[in-house]
Amino acid sequence: MIPNETKPPFTLTVLYTTDVHGNALPHHYADNSPSPTGFARLAPLIRAERRRHDHTLLLDNGDLIQGTPFTYYYSRFASDGPHPMISVLNELGYDAAVIGNHEFNYGMDLLNKAVRESRFPWMAANIVDAATGEPYFGKPYLLKEYPEGVRVAVLGLTTHYTPNWEHPRNLIGLVFKDACETAKIWVKRLKEEERADLVIVSYHGGFERNLDTGELTENETGENQGYRMCMEVPGIDILLTGHQHREIDGACINGVRIIQAGGMGMHLGMAEATLQWENRAWRVTGTESKLLHQGEFVPDPAVVELVSGVEEGTQRWLDQPIGFVEGDMTIADPMKARLAEHPYIEFLNRVQMEAAEADISCTSLFDNWSPGFGSRITMREIVANYIYPNTLKVLRVSGQDIKDALERAAAYFEWTGSEARVSAGFSDPKPQHYNYDMWEGIEYELDIARPLGDRVVKLEQDGKPLDPAGEYDVAMNNYRAVGGGEYPMFKDKPVVRDITVDVSELLAGYILEKGTIKASVNRNWKVTANGVEVVKGEEAER
């Protein structure tokens, strides 16, 4: 009889980033003010943690190469050179990365180039080649065996809801399979065929249910399946998540250790697993997770140097003057700009209508940091306001579709009896200001004191009620045109016109042509509570 040998415990430390969204340096591009974000800030922490632990894995969980003027500039004007974000991950010695939904925003050519330049594998088990059925980005998992004999597997998955947002031309030849069902197949294979002692799933997706109660927190679209994976996929020890930009640590669901490390490089996620040698096999005996934040720091010199060329080009491009504003188009209060028509929103819709040759348009104020336009407009202000690489589509929709879309938008507000607030459906688990649309080319009133689904109290065009069965051509961004943001009334509607130039470029071109634009509103819509306008101040009276 062979005696049962003893081995010391084995601990693996997993360090990961997620949803960094092109943040390399710690500043806001709108005004170059300091920001607690980016790889130059995180890099010293990453290096220190890797020195501190005997066994580490360093992973990125997706949405890496899009999200700032820095990455936009690279994609449009500097893509002949190495991708700066990939150069940073190579420098820091990343072991693997997962494809995020925003990786596709600048097209497959740029994404494939980034993958080729990476000294680490990119994983997405559920994104397969339509011709072969095999994972498009190569091996869908990372398998690493340590000298102690511990075998660790990391499976990469991407939210399969991606095609509902992304432009179809950027996904040609790809099939997105259900992430949870794919996990069931591959985790079983990793345990049985690859004999993995520790299984980590790195999923660019989040949680669709309350972590404590299990109650649904969003419609069951499949966009986020983290909770379901924990409940239905046996064999997962650690689940790394993202996409929602939430900060989650120190929690388990059904015995699975979970973590979500926010976004923009503000945190470094850390998950640890301890394994014991028992009955001639390694067993996971404990896990933990926490978020690490870099306090006092000196920007990592190597990171700063790697991105300096693209950064200098970005700064020059951003400071190019392109036009002027007559009047006031700055945004002092984003909530007021959503409660009463604002000159900046009016301008966006007018440009969309002209570019798309449409009589109706809808757009949104994407976040609460949009500054609007000052008296002198530069590219910096364009990209600080219009932060996504959207294009335009003109859809042919019915009057009823427009009403349904307005009801969806009206759900953005919660009326307390004395003031309007952002509803939980648009703020939890992450802010979704970009899903509240404001319209031009129609006249409407939303009474937010009324029940959800019954808030549109006026809907007209040229003084006449919109015909529910009538057909109307509407300009909107490509994200909304495929139903993104829970606007199913737009999904699969006829596309009358497709404008493939980025909206930010359309805005810049319009301003360059006009030289000076005028800040004005036509007061075609209003938000009321019990028939009384919620905002009557400066924003409403421009």
Image (cartoon, helix red, strand yellow):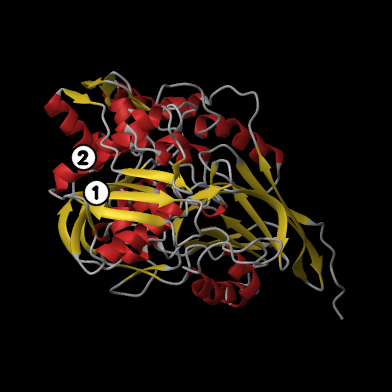
Query: Which residue corresponds to the image point at 21% horizontal and 32% vertical from the top-left?
Result: 508
The residue singled out by tag 2 in the image is 350
266 vs 343, nearest the viewer:
343
Q: Earlier in the sequence, mark 2 or mark 1?
A: 2
The spot of residue 513 in percent (x, y) is 12, 28
Number of marks drawn: 2
Neighbours of disc 2 within 10 Å: few (<14), some (14-19), many (20+): some
Q: Secondary structure at mark 1?
A: strand
Query: Do callouts 2 and 1 mark residues in contact (Cβ within 8 Å)?
Result: yes
Distance (Cα) linking label 2 and label 1: 8 Å
Q: Is residue 406 above or below residue 377?
A: below
Q: Disc 1 designates what residue?
A: 361
Q: Is residue 379 above or below residue 427?
A: above
Q: Is any atom of residue 280 visible in this view? A: yes
Residue 489, located in which quarter of the rendered image? bottom left
Lateral position of residue 377 relative to residue 526, left or right: left
Residue at 41 percent across and 64 percent down: it is 161
Taking the spot 35% from the left edge, 59% from the top edge, the residue there is 405
Counting other residues with Cα less than 10 Å from the Cα at mark 1, is it few (<14), some (14-19), or many (20 or more)?
many
Residue 108 visible at all: no
Position of residue 228 measured from the top left corner of the image (x, y, whole percent): 59, 70
* Residue 5 falls left or right of residue 165: right
Measuring from the top left, give residue 272's x and y in whole percent. Answer: 71, 52
From this view, report whether residue 291 is shown above or below residue 508: below
455 left or right, relative to 242:
left
372 vs 461, left or right, is: right
